[in-house]
């Protein structure tokens, strides 16, 4: 049987001993949490091996679960390994991908918004058989939809992995990356809710930033929400995971954007571009970003000229001058150390002649 431990909130756990979620017998390989019915609590999907169907448990909202045996996702399986939830069609609910071993086809299930799934039977995603293991969603090309990566191979068999680029649709989205000011900079455990009007109905979607999903895998650390036909986000609610719980609420947030939120600060839109280029010079995104306390800023010049590179805080005050001199044509990288500066959003500005570019960077301590 599988184990479920309830966190008592003080660093101690209580073992749950009743309910099918801990009494079902199977050779389970992975588990994935997600709010599949948009009721504010997290349901559980469990992959099984050795000819046992997978399990789906619906959270009743009172620390108990009901096993769903009628769903198509609970009537497939037998050689399942990885699984991951993500809104692949941006319609406002979590869909499910399941990776299968033993050269069986992988599975993709689309959610109708109430937790009822339909199995997809066409397309390469569900017709590329292999010895698949972990799987994860991420918008790697930053076009507003979730792409999919699947790992393959099991000794002694060696197989290429799968990468699927989502072709997308016209539905809206929002992507939010959270940075905590605590040691938990990736904000693992932070919960984000988005409230919107979708198809004439007010809908609340809930995500949590997880450090793991399913078997041997992890989704991107930002949270992605499909918004269907929503034209504005009524509110974004962030409950930070910290020793002293903190809630932040942002209202009237634009759709179809990528946002960064630093705990305690405002929500900030970020550009999709890693590099901005003019005919005279180009400026790359600093790396790493976010950083603590060192980062690199790189740029290239197509001609010799007076060049200025400066850093400003969020109020527009100049806090650092990296270059203010005549530079030859070429590629330059400056390493900066901001050990003596507070956490926050900073801007760096490259200027030469009558042209300039500025980009944003994030210092987190």
Image (cartoon, rainbow, N blue to C red):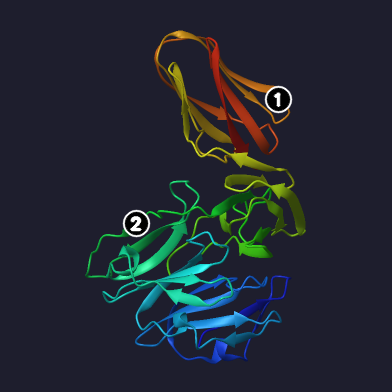
Choose between 341 and 136: the one closer to the eye: 136
Secondary structure under the numbered disc 1 in the rendered image:
loop
Q: Which residue is drawn at the image coordinates 29% and 76% (left, top)?
A: 104
- Tell me the quarter of the picture where residue 239 sits: bottom right
Coordinates of residue 97 in the picture (x, y in percent): 43, 69
Residue positioned most to the front: 200
Mark sitting on residue 163: 2
Tell which circle, 2 or 1, labels the residue nearer the N-terminal end. 2
Name the image quarter holding the C terminus.
top right
Question: 167 above or below 126?
Answer: above
One can see residue 227 in this view? yes
Q: Which residue is drawn at the image coordinates 59% and 76% (left, top)?
A: 43
- On the image, numbered disc 1 is attached to which residue? 316
Coordinates of residue 333 in the picture (x, y in percent): 46, 25
Choose between 312 and 352: the one closer to the eye: 352
Can you tell which of label 2 and label 1 is closer to the viewer?
2
């Amino acid at each position: 049987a599988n184990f479920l431990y309830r966190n008592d909130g003080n660093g101690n756990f209580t073992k749950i001993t009743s309910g099918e979620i801990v009494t079902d017998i199977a050779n389970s390989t992975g588990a994935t949490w997600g709010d599949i019915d948009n009721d504010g609590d997290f349901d559980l999907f469990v992959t099984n091996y050795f000819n046992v169907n997978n399990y789906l448990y619906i959270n009743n909202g009172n620390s108990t679960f009901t096993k769903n045996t009628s769903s198509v996702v609970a009537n497939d399986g037998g050689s399942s390994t990885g699984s991951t939830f993500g809104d692949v069609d941006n319609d406002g609910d979590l869909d499910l991908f399941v990776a299968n071993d033993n050269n069986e086809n992988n599975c993709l299930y689309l959610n109708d918004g109430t937790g009822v799934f339909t199995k997809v039977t066409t397309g390469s995603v569900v017709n590329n058989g292999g010895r698949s293991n972990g799987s994860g969603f991420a918008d790697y090309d930053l076009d507003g939809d979730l792409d999919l990566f699947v790992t393959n191979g099991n000794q002694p068999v060696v197989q290429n992995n799968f990468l699927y680029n989502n072709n997308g649709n016209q539905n809206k989205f929002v992507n939010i990356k959270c940075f905590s000011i605590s040691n938990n900079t990736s904000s693992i455990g932070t919960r984000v809710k988005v409230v919107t009007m979708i198809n004439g109905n007010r809908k609340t979607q809930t995500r949590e930033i997880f450090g793991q999903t399913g078997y041997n895998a992890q989704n991107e650390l930002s949270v992605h929400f499909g918004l269907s036909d929503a034209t504005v986000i009524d509110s974004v609610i962030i409950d930070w995971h910290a020793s002293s719980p903190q809630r932040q609420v942002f209202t009237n947030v634009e759709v179809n954007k990528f946002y960064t939120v630093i705990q305690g600060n405002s929500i900030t839109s970020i550009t999709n571009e890693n590099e901005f280029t003019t005919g005279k010079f180009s400026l790359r995104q600093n790396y790493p970003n976010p950083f603590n306390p060192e980062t690199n800023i790189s740029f290239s010049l197509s001609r010799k000229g007076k060049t200025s590179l400066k850093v400003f805080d969020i109020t527009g005050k100049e806090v650092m001058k990296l270059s203010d001199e005549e530079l030859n044509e070429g590629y330059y990288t400056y390493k900066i150390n901001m050990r003596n500066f507070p956490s926050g959003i900073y801007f760096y500005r490259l200027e030469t002649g009558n042209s300039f570019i500025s980009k944003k960077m994030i210092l987190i301590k």
